Image (cartoon, rainbow, N blue to C red):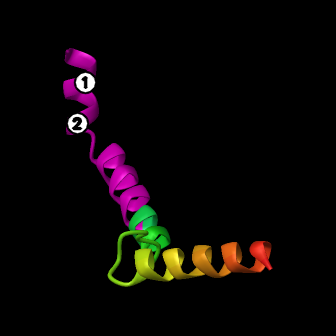
Amino acid sequence: MKLYTNFNNDPMAKKEIDNAWQEAKKEAKGKNPFAPGRIKEALNAYKADMKKENT
């Protein structure tokens, strides 16, 4: 428990975690698979592929 407390009180560790979190958020921005319209686009693409295979 003491190690955890020391880690949480370390300003350098907090800064590194915050920087990593900000970078992860930037990288993930715009990649939400559940964004409005994405599921519908995926279904339409799937249906188009199925039609190609059947013809």
Q: Residue at x 32, y 82 (%)?
A: 36
Q: Amino acid at mark 1?
A: Tyr
User: Where is mark 2, residue-wise?
Assistant: 8
Q: Is residue 18 magenta?
A: yes
Q: Nearer the viewer, residue 2 or 21?
A: 21
- Secondary structure of the residue carrying tag 2 is helix
Q: Residue at x 28, y 19 (%)?
A: 3
- Left or right: residue 49 versus residue 5 is right
Magenta: main secondary structure: helix
Tag 2–tag 1 contact (CB < 8 Å): yes
Q: Residue at x 37, y 58 (%)?
A: 21
Which stretch appears magenta?
A: 1-22
User: Where is mark 1, residue-wise?
Assistant: 4
- Left or right: residue 42 versus residue 16 is right
Where is residue 12 drawn, in percent x and y? 35, 47
- Secondary structure of the residue carrying tag 1 is helix
